[in-house]
Image: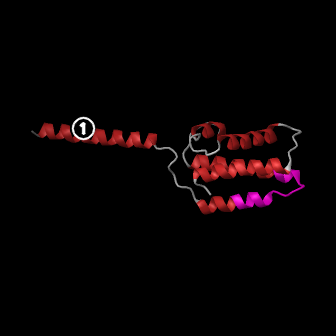
Amino acid sequence: MDASIIILFAAVIIIAVLLFVVVTLTKKGTTVLDVDKYRSRWLTIEQSLMRDNEPSYHLAIMNADKLLDQALRERGFKGQTMGDRMKFAKETWSNRNAVWQSHKLRNQIAHETDIHITYDQARRALAGFKQALKDLGAI
């Protein structure tokens, strides 16, 4: 009788550990973000965008992209690159095209030497990032 109790106890322990591992590995995107921190950083980004100052467009877009990437990481989305994390979060986006266009514009700014963007393009990109941050529960 003692051996059967030990085997039963061991089986219960093994099942509990397996359940814990499964829940931990499948838990994705459930972390609650610090909304106050994200709102504050977002307001700083929006206020940095100045009409007739193209470098401010570039900087605001770069910073918005970084903020979104941080939110994706904190929410637990996996991936080597931000693009990978965005793909894992695709069901989260209410406007997939807007967030991807915003990120693509950021990539152009980062990788092309002679890119010129307008104030309206910068505002649209920021709107895409803002909606993505809302979709993640960051702002």
In the image, 94 versus 86, the foreground residue is: 94
Relative to 82, is 109 on the left or the right? right
Residue for badge 1: 11
Magenta region: which residues? 42-58
Which is more toward the observer, 117 or 107? 117
Does the magenta-highlighted stretch encompass residue 49?
A: yes
Predominant secondary structure in magenta?
A: helix
In the rendered image, residue 32 lying in the magenta stretch gets the answer no
Q: Quadrant of the C terminus?
A: bottom right
Query: 113 or 6: nearer the eye?
Result: 113
> Where 22 sits versus 58, above or below?
above
Q: In this view, does 76 lie above or below 87?
A: below
User: Given the image, on which type of amino acid does mark 1 rest?
Assistant: Ala
Q: Quadrant of residue 15?
A: top left
**Marker count (numbered):** 1
Quarter of the figure with the N terminus: top left
Q: Residue at x 80, y 49 (%)?
A: 122
Residue 77 screen position, x and y as percent: 56, 42
Q: Which residue is drawn at 80% across and 37% down?
A: 111
In which quadrant of the rendered view does residue 88 lie?
top right
Residue 42, horizontal then vertical, whole percent: 70, 58
